[in-house]
Amino acid sequence: MSSLAEQVRHDSASLYQFVCSISDLCERRNPAAAYLSSSERFFQYLVELGAATKTYIQKFPGTRTQATEYLDLRNEIAVLRAGWQFLHALVKPALDSDTLHLPSALLEGLISRFRAIPKYVDTDFVIYHTDEFNYLNVRLNVFRKNADLIAGLVGGPPFPEKLALVGIPYSQSSSLFMNCLIPHEMGHHVFGDSSLGSKLRPTIEQELLKSLGAQLSAVERIAVTDMLVRWSEELFCDLFAVRLVGFCYSLAFIELFDTAKSLDENGNLSADRSLGMTEFDEYPPDLFRIKQQVAILAKDKWWPDLVKVDSHYIRLLEAAQKMKDTDFGFSTGTAVDPTKVTAAFFTVVPQVLSELDSITVGLESGFEGWKKTCPAIEEYLESGVVPSSLLEKPEADLKFAYPDPVALLNSSYKFYVESLDRLLGQIKDADVNAIGTRSEWAVKVQMWTAKAIEDVILLKRKGTP
């Protein structure tokens, strides 16, 4: 049997190999691929952390002679391997996400909008692909803990400040409308960065004690509190997204979760009571989330104009707005009274709204810009023209308006759900009833809008708008 020293040398070389396999991918990435600056920062960080780790591993044998010293090294090898396995999971998804495989213009517009919040003027986002059909936020408190544990052992760089990670479904890399859900993931970053869970938890615990008292064991109280904190986080992220980009988030939410199935043949909510329910330990009911989104749309002045839009998506928003708190609940196999639990959740909702207002203070809603430019944007889309430079009337003055990304996203989504037939009416021999045709031109609308966002960003860099 080999000596303990030989075993540790073997394990050290194996770990060295593993770290090389990750850091070399980042260092020798395809030179023909272009990445967002945030991704470049992420890759460079991994290269530097890898170099520090490899240098540290090479010094392992050193002057160690005692068995206890080699056993300690074994423990360090296990810690470093676990840490790099954690990092491994994000490297290929990030490398796959070059600018040709991301909605780069949209992302730049969203990040620019996010940075309009004073606290986040220098925050950046690494966007990576995920094979889940869901949008994901990497919790930095977990990621940084693992990364900095490696750095602490090997003397490497800490994880970069003001850098967050968001995953998008790989299939949606060119989508515009579905990626309006990205601001929700940005909201998760804000929720964690602002420690809102810790702020909301005492209110929830106090309300549960007041309403349920001894009916809840200590273990049950922790479980229910954790669930309601998660509900509060999801709600905050929904409302943050609406505050950031407007109603396009709500329309994308309805589309992703097929929430329109809640409507009956007359455009009203189905009588099925389960529509306002969710399972214990899951997200709040979708219709409750939509109801709260409408509250923000109303507060930010979008709602009076939005409710006039002729779309079943808008009818769903309208129907959800009319639901009462007693229409919502959750099902569970435990003895916990669900009505009292939901009542405890409702007491924290105003605090969630207050935190949202505090964090986004000074951020313009974007409504005024949308209201001013939406008719012209829709007119351009109807004619198949990229709506980046809008000729103001009277045309003889040759003055142009340059809509911002919020105006473009909301105008385009409104056109898509309400007026696609107007565009198809301009296309010779287009069959408005053909699903393939509608899909094809819906994609074109998104492409024109994405190009408009890209144009406006370029014009802004030149100081034109």
Image (cartoon, rainbow, N blue to C red):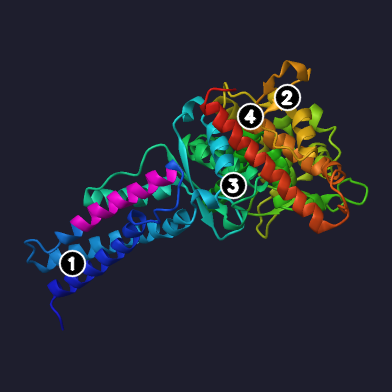
Quarter of the figure with the C terminus: top right
| Of marks 2 and 4, the one in the foreground | 2
Task: Calculate the distance from the C-alpha at mark 2 to the C-alpha at mark 4.
Answer: 15 Å
Kindly identify which numbered label has been placed on residue 214.
Answer: 3
Is-magenta flag for residue 49? yes
Q: Is residue 27 left or right of residue 347?
A: left
Q: Amino acid at mark 4?
A: Asp
**Mark with earlier residue (2, 3):** 3
User: In the image, what residue type sits under mark 1?
Assistant: Leu
x, y percent for residue 18: 30, 65
Q: Tag 3, which secondary structure?
A: helix
Which numbered tag is attached to residue 391?
2
Marks 1 and 4 close (CB-CB < 8 Å): no
Prevailing secondary structure class for the magenta stretch in the rendered image: helix
- Label 2 CA crowd tier, 10 Å (few <14, some 14–19, many 20+): some
Could you tell me which secondary element the residue under label 2 belongs to? strand
Compute the Cα span from label 4 to label 3: 54 Å
Label 4: few (<14), some or many (≥20) within 10 Å?
A: many
- Who comes first in sequence, dot 2 or dot 4? 2
Please state the extent of the stretch shown in magenta in the rendering. Answer: 38-55
Check the image and report above or below for 272 versus 426: below
In the image: residue 329, left or right of residue 216: right
Q: CA distance from mark 1 to mark 4?
A: 60 Å
Q: Is residue 30 above or below residue 407?
A: below
